[in-house]
Structures are given as structure tokens and as C-alpha cells.
Amino acid sequence: RSVMERVLQRRSLRMRNMQRAWRESPEGRKMMDFRKSLPAFQEKERLLQAIARNQVIVISGETGCGKTTQLPQYILESEIESGRGAFCSIICTQPRRISAMAVAERVSAERGEPLGEAVGYKVRLEGVKGKNTHLLFCTSGILLRRLLSDRNLNGITHVFVDEIHERGMNEDFLLIVLKDLLPRRKDLRLILMSATLNAELFSSYYGGAPTIHIPGFTYPVRAQFLEDILELTGYKLTSFNQVDDYGQEKVWKTQKQLVPRKRKNQITTLVEDALNNSSFDNYCSRVRDALARWMPDCVGFNLIEAVLCHICRKERPGSVLVFMTGWEDISCLRDQLKAHPLLGDPNRILLLTCHGSMATSEQKLIFEKPPPNVRKIVLATNMAEASITINDVVFVVDCGKAKETSYDALNNTPCLLPSWISKASARQRKGRAGRVQPGECYHLYPRCVYEAFAEYQLPELLRTPLNSLCLQIKSLQVGSIGEFLSAALQPPKPLAVQNAIDFLKMIGALDEKENLTNLGKYLTMLPVDPKLGKMLIMGAIFRCFGPILTIVSGLSVRDPFLLPQDKKDLAGAAKSRFSAKDYSDHMALVRAYEGWKEAEREGSAYEYCWRNFLSAQTLQAIHSLRKQFNFILKDAGLIEEDTNNNNKLSHNQALVRAIICSGLYPGIASVVHRETSMSFKTMDDGQVSLYANSVNARYETIPYPWLVFGEKVKVNSVFIRDSTGVSDSILILFGGALACGAQAGHLKMLNGYIDFFMDHNLAECLLKLKEELDKLLQK
Ligand code: ADP
Ligand code: MG
């Protein structure tokens, strides 16, 4: 036998010895006892057999029954036990990075090993794994990326795709690619895992794959709806019927009256008679409308505060999990609660947050037991719905909404709005309270609103722009994008696909025949949105990498400029101090970041952030993302070791502006000056407004004919968030040539530049050219 085989055999034996030793140790036994108590354990043999006999199986079971942590581990253990541990290679995907990390850590602990031994993880820009790693938890994006370079997944023996019920875009995409792969890899095993019971949908997609259900045990959870809660917290809800008749202002008054603690026993003026005089559907839709107005975003912080007070004062011990819509709301509520006499008392309350971009250290705290007599309250996004299990939760507060991207293909505009969740989600949220004992769930909406929820959420593939996805499909070399996507579980609309292809052509990532250009090839190497990837590449080529790196990191994390509701004006003024005469949110970000680095060196970072309404946490995240992008671009050979060389032209404002433009194009709006005001028009003639916190919103005039922007979001009307002013010449040279109608030729030119500059370092030349052009155009 080959040397390699012998090495692996020896390693397999070592793995077996280690596994047995752990199981016989006292801690190992204790851990085994716990693991045996999980519902999945009852099904272990049946599962292993089914996996051995079928290429694809679908497994469903309650959240917390042990799918994610146990099933891949069963395979690993049984392979190790049979002396083939070093020969198997198991991948288990997660929709979110934080769950991939948390689960890998947990499984390592269950095996009594440090992370990166038999079990590891890999998420975008981060990972812990070693040469002995045989079970890898990764995001679905990472597996897709791997499929780009290794179409047959050589060496992988088992693939688990977890949380498929969420119908995330990457999961749906993976399902198509894997379906295509299975006939070529007859020995590969595919296991699909889902929390809720629509297993048949997936089973039939894979030609009737067997399904196994793990019966779970959870304690009963009592659901309380808004009407019950209001009574609990000292108010009585009677009807929404009259809310409809209230003007917006009055509605607000009603809400305010509801909350002051002094008027606790006041009964509001709403009367329950709605069902008597309208059809149910009609009623529900009116209730929804009214509710949306009554509690915009349905977060109604004050109501959450009231419920939390009620729990902390009146209820038995147990942790509380609060579902909110997004990070902004969470941080806002956290600050508000910190100032509360009861809820802000650290001796009694451990207040934590749980969202996609939190730090790993913070993440661990969520799972930990709080000290005795301290109640843990976790403010979470819908991430805590299915992928993360916090065991000691006894109370759930559900605001009923989640921030969901939706996509208006007709207007080619993404919308990010908190919208009502589905019944499946609401049930799932409720179930989080019954893990260790009977629980309580407070739904902050009336029962009739719940009844009107959709059964399941629309798959992400049908409600997001497909730009990144189409680029990835192209690099899989599977032929036409449209044809490929038509094989999806629920294919997206042709118009949405066409928009994405048009976009990729417009930025120069695809040529007219839909083939990847050089730029496109580079973009597939970078794990960011194509726009931002292009900006990074241009920043590298033109030797002004530093500021562009900050901008791209900032746009990928989130805005570090805070906007507290009650200090909007001060915060806006603070931000515009960073803008000077740049007319650019992006450059304000660069200045703010550089100022922060400076302040950090002087030991005054805290004051700096406080004074300037900046989030230290976000700046820190931007800082670490910067390092990671830096590493990737070095790895791809796009930048040099020598930082000075990469930043030769960083001081050149016009160049920074030009590169921002090259990345954000075709996100451009023309600035239309009228006598007393300005308005902004996008390329498709749509009217847009500036986000209130944009530095450009504070100027009376903008001395640039164009604004380039990163995203256009439909909230009530269409807004652009961050923008930068650019001149005609910059737009012609670095953006598209829409203004002079030479689009296609221009794109070719842009592509040509990139090839050219890869070979020659001629940034200065182009700058000269640009200056000349500027002069010419100004005549
Ligand atoms: P599922 O994937 O079916 O939702 P998991 O495999 O994630 O379930 O979790 C199974 C059980 O393992 C949970 O109910 C919980 O008790 C325990 N568990 C999971 N992760 C952790 C953790 N990080 N710390 C402590 N216990 C955990
Ligand atoms: Mg799971």
C-alpha cells in the first residue's frame, strides 16, 4: 500500500485511542451522558444506516434536538471507531458565520479536544482548522467558494447542508450545484437538515430522497398576545378599530399614554368590537395597517421595556430572549435599558446582545450561565431563531418582525424593511422558551395579526438582487446563468436574473457574451460584493490602497457614525466636521477612522468616539476587517508587501474620489439645483433623497454635478445612504459613460485599463490624462 495510506491508517488508530480515552475519562462520561439525553441520540443507528444506504437524505427535527452538533459528529465517531477516522472528511454548512463558529467550538468541547483538532471551522476571512481536521463547519458561502475551485469536492466524503428551511440564497444555490454534482460523485453523501416540517419539498427536489424525522421534546410554552400582555403590564387593549380613525398624531399620543408607569392602570380607549362589523381578511389587513402605524417597526421599545419589567418583577427565574429587527434597534434599546433603574442594574441583570456582526468574545457570554440571582436578558436578531440555542431561556419576547431584504425587480431596487415574520418563524421563536422548563412567550402583536401571517417566508433567492450570485455561477462554468437558475427549487424571475447580468456587464465583470472578463475573474477571488471588490482592485492598482481599504471595510461592516434618536442634530454636525469640503460620506469615514487610530495612539480613543458620535465597536470591526482584506489582496498578488508603495497616491483626493466612483458606478445620481433647493435623480430618472445623516444632506449646494452612492434603499421613498460628489471627467473615466452615451466602448476601455495597469504601473499617467480631460471639459 502507498505510504500515504499507511500514514492515514496510523493516524486513524491514534484518533481511535484518543476518542476512547476521552469517553472513559470522568468529564468525557459526563459529556456523553448529556449527549445521550438529546432526542437525536435515539435515532442514531437509524440515521447512520440511512446515510450508509442512500446518497441523499433529509432530516428534520425541532431546534435543539441535536441535529447540528450531533449528526456530523456521529459520522465522525463511527468512522473513527471503525479505524477509518483519518480517511473521512465531513463538511457541515451553516447559513451564518457566528453559528459555524459556535457549533465548531461546542463539538470540539464535546469531544474533549481543542478547536482545530478533529473539528474546525471556516468562515469568510477567518478559520481554525488543522491537518487533523476531519469535520469542518463552514458557512454555505465558503462551500460554494470551494466548489468554484474544486468542482467535484475531491476528498470530501459527507456534506451536511444545515438550516435549509430558512431558504437562504446560498443554501438554495448549493442545492442546485450539489444536485448536479451527485451523479459524478456516487460515493459522496449529502445530508440535508431542516428545523420545520416541510421536508417533503426537499425530498422531492432530490427525486424522493428518504426523510427522517427526529421527534423532539420541548416543554409547553404559553403564548401571550398583545391583548394579554397589555393587561399584564397594566393596560387593556380593546380594539384597533378606532386606531384606524386616529390621525397619525393621535396614534402616537395613544402610544405614549400607554406607557408612562404613573398611569399604570389606565385603560386605553380602544374598544373590542372589530370582528363584528367586517370580514376577517379585511379586518386583518386593517389591523396590520393600524398596527404598523401605531407601533412603527412594531418594536415599540417602551412596550418591550414594560414586558421586561414585568418579567423581572413578577416572574420566576429564567433567562429572557428578545427578538428584535436589527442591530440598530438592538443597540438603541440596550442603551435605553442601561439607564433603567431595574433593568440597568448590573447586580440584577446581565444584558447581552446577539447579532450577526458581534465579536466572538461577546458570543460566548450568551451561552454562559449568569451568576446566581442575576437574570440574563439577550437582545437578538432572528439569528437566535434556529441556528443558535440558548439553553436557559424561559421567556421569549417576540416583536413579530424581522428585517428582511426584499427586491423590487421592476425598479431594480433592493428594499430593507422590517416586515412581519411568518407563522413558522413565530412558532420557532416561541419554541425557544421551552428548552429546560415550561416557558412563556410574549408576542407583541394581537392574535389576529398572527393569524394573518404567511405560512412560510419567501425564499431569499426570490427577494434579493442576484449580482454576486450570478458572478459566482459564471465562475462555476456551468453555462448560461438563466438556465442554471431555472433549476432552482423555486427559480427567480427572469427579469431579476437579467438585471443582475446587466449590472455585471455594466461594471465590466462580464463581456457582451456573458463571459467573465479579467476584472470578473479577480472579483470572484474576493469574498465581497462585486462593487466593493472592484473598488479594492482599483485602489490597489492606483496605489491608493489605504483609504479605499477603510471605505470598503466600512461599507461591509456598517456605518460607525451613530445617530441617536434624540441627538440627531448634534450627531449630524459631528459627522459633517469630518467632511470639510469633501462632499463625501466615504471620505468622512476615512477621516474618522484615521482620527480614531491617532486618538488610540494617544490613549484617548474613548473620548474621541464619545465626542464624535462614533461607535468604537464598529471602528474596531472595521479595523480588523481591513487587516483581513489586506491579507487577501496580498495573497492574490494584487498589492505589494511594502505599504508605502501601495499608498504612494493615497493623499490624492481626486484619485480617491475616482476610485470610489469606479466601484460604486452605476450607483449615480445627478445633482439638480433649483433656486432654493437641490434634488437628485438617478440614471433611470427616479427621484431619490439623501439619508438624513449624510454629510451631503447638510450642504445647501453641492459643487459637483454627480453623486455616486453605494446603495439605494426603499424605505418610504427611495433613499441613498452614503454618497460622494464627483465631476464629469471622473465619471467618464472611471464610471460609465452614460452622460455621453458611449457605454459599451467605455466599458471595454475600463477593462483595458485594468489589464494594462496590471502590467505597467501607470497610475500617474492616467491622472495626467484625467487632468487634461478635466481642463478640456471645463472649457
Ligand atoms: P439543533 O441543530 O437540532 O437545533 P444543536 O445540535 O444545535 O440542535 O444543539 C443540541 C443541544 O446541544 C442543544 O439543545 C443544547 O442543549 C446543546 N448545545 C448546543 N450548543 C451549545 C453550546 N454552545 N453550549 C452549551 N450547550 C450547547
Ligand atoms: Mg441546528
Image (cartoon, helix red, strand yellow):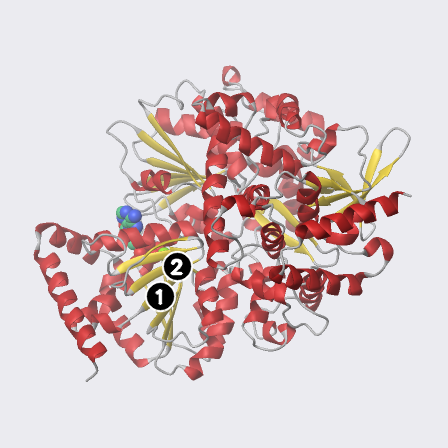
Measured from the top left, where is residue 359 in percent x and y? 40, 41
Splitting the image into 4 quarters, where does residue 189 fall? Answer: bottom left
The residue lying furthest to the top in this view is 262
- Where does the image place residue 319, in percent across and percent down from the top left? 33, 36
Q: Nearer the viewer, residue 758 or 52?
A: 758
* Mark 2 or mark 1: whose residue is earlier in sequence: 1
Q: Is residue 218 above or below residue 650?
A: below
- Residue designated by label 1: 91
Residue type beneath disc 1: Ile
The quarter of the rendering in which ligand 2 is drawn is: bottom left
Q: Residue 243's x, y, as percent?
A: 67, 32
Check mark 1 vs ligand 2: CB closer than 8 Å? yes or no.
no
Q: Kindly identify which residue carries mark 2.
A: 138
**Secondary structure category for the residue under label 2:** strand
Quadrant location of the N terminus in the rendered image: bottom left
Which secondary structure lies at badge 1? strand
Q: In the figure, is residue 380 to the left or right of 773?
A: left
Name the side, left or right, on which 260 lies relative to 83.
right
Identify the amino acid type marked 2: Cys
- Circles 2 and 1: CB distance less than 8 Å? yes
Residue 478, quarter of the rendered image: bottom right
Q: Which quarter of the rendered picture does the C terminus lie within?
A: top right
- Kindly identify the residue that appears in the image at 31 percent across and 47 percent down: 435
In this view, the residue in front, 484 or 533, is 533
Position in image of residue 245 (x %, y %): 72, 32
Q: Is residue 351 above or below residue 670?
A: above
Q: Is residue 466 visible?
A: no
Relative placement, left or right, of 306 versus 348 is right
Please give the name of the residue rendered at 82% of the width and 56% of the height, measured from the top-left corner.
Answer: 738
